[in-house]
Amino acid sequence: MSEDAVQITARGPRAQAEAAAAAIDETPSTETVTYSILEEDEDRDVWRIDAFPTSEEERRGLMEVLGGFGALRVATEKLADADWLAMSLSGLPPVRAGRFFVYGAHDRGLAPPSSVNLRIEAGAAFGTGHHGTTVGCLQAFHDLLRAQSFPKVLDVGCGTGVLAIAAARTGSRLAVGTDIDRVSVRIANENAALNQATAHFVHASGLDHPQVRGGRPYDLVFANILAPPLVALSQDIRRALRPGGLAILSGLLRTQERRVLAAYTSKGFRLVRRLHRDAWATLVLRRA
């Protein structure tokens, strides 16, 4: 990041923090901002939002959105001109979700032989496995694998590629991922090579890329993105799935479940399961 990079932090009650996070997702100037929301102090009901704007427009938008929630204490901290992302990732512990063990280069010696070990280097892409949405997707996938296999898998908004790589490492003969960010696609393909996985990633907006269309119909679609694009892609995801196929959706807050569910049930999906981790939700849906 540049020397002008900042981190914006907001602290306050859970209800206000979740409402503010939903507003970030729904405001045009901030809907693509990278942020996290987590519980900081359970006894005092303190939740925290950490946001990382990449432009002055995003910074102003965040301050305007967060300023609309009076119970939140908002602070801005200038980030040093250093590889802050790599430094922060180096302190993250490995993550276990069902049979999957996700780790970075600094923890390669901790990978247990009995797990599906996924070495994921994030670089500038989202999806190290630590975020509640990624963990939810991996846990849901682990549970589904107990009863069935998924020969063809699509990962929409792949980030680091961890979900498609997990599919390729557990028997999927076709695992395709897409992302609107070219850097993420490059990093995802590098991670696939690191893990000796046959997953392949392409730069695409939507699901109309030739390499995506060529794999239809899919047995499983991952979409770990934000609530607004989840809603917008509901018909495309239905079209990409075979009848009876499954979708694992995440990237949404618990407060956004009803909106996302309504979009998919109107397209003929039914809810199979929901998982909650912190403020985040993961939905497992089956196409009728």
Image: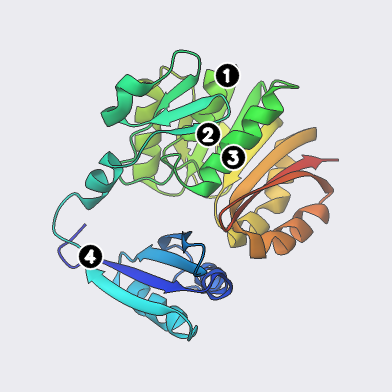
The image quadrant that residue 285 belongs to is top right
* Nearest to the observer: residue 104 or residue 52: 104
Rate crowding at label 1 as few (under 14), some (14 to 19) or many (20 or more) other CA atoms within 10 Å. some
- Helix, strand or loop at disc 4? loop
From the image, tell me which residue sits under label 4. 5
Q: Is residue 285 left or right of residue 33?
A: right
Q: What type is the residue that disc 4 sits on?
A: Ala
Mark pair 2, 1: CA separation: 11 Å
- Helix, strand or loop at disc 2? helix
* Nearest to the observer: residue 94 or residue 8: 94
From the image, tell me which residue sits under label 1. 170
On-image quarter of the N terminus:
bottom left
Say if mark 3 contacts mark 2, CB within 8 Å. Answer: yes
Q: What type is the residue that disc 1 sits on?
A: Thr
- x then y, percent, for residue 15: 59, 73
Q: What type is the residue that disc 2 sits on?
A: Leu
From the image, tell me which residue sits under label 3. 137
- Helix, strand or loop at disc 3? helix
Residue at image position (68%, 24%) is 145
Residue at image position (35%, 36%) is 186
